[in-house]
Amino acid sequence: MLISARCLQLRRFQTKEKDYPVGILGSGPAGIAAAGELTAAGVKVTIYEREAAAGGVLQWGIPSYVLPDKVSRRPVQALQDAGVAIQTNTNVTPEMMEIL
């Protein structure tokens, strides 16, 4: 599910911002979709990505001649524009789960 910046903007005005933050492990298609839905519901979201670039299989699993890099970065950029924080190069271990 790809989320456009306009869709997030329109849905954000329909809900109040929630008081609790949510952390999502991984910025692949599932993480992007979850972050989009939660952001649209007014939840503050942080995505923790182990790799250097966000996007998961969109970034490294699909060749650029099939899905150009410019296109594969759109969902991540839309989330960042909507206020989602993305922390790359962050390997979350079981011990860190208590802190987060």
Image (cartoon, grey):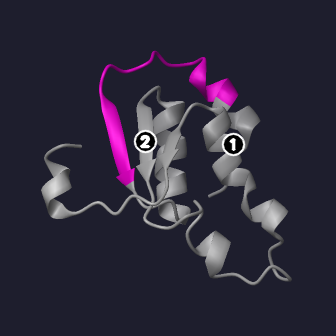
15 or 63: nearer the eye? 63
Q: Is 40 displayed left or right of 95 in the figure?
A: right
User: Which of labels 1 and 2 is toward the front?
Assistant: 2
* Residues packed near mark 2 inside 10 Å, few (<14), some (14 to 19) or many (20 plus): some
Cα gap from disc 1 to disc 2, whole angstroms: 14 Å
Residue 84 place in picture, x, y as percent: 53, 37
Name the residue located 57 percent from the left edge and 31 percent from the top edge. Answer: 83
Q: Does the magenta portion include 92?
A: no
Q: Is 85 displayed left or right of 2 in the figure?
A: left
Q: Does the magenta portion include 13?
A: yes
Q: Which residue is mark 2?
A: 46
For marks 1 and 2 on the same chain, the one whose residue lies earlier in the sequence: 2
Name the residue located 69 percent from the left edge and 42 percent from the top edge. Answer: 78
Magenta stretch: give its range.
9-24
Looking at the image, is 64 positioned above or below residue 7? below
Quadrant containing the N terminus is: bottom right
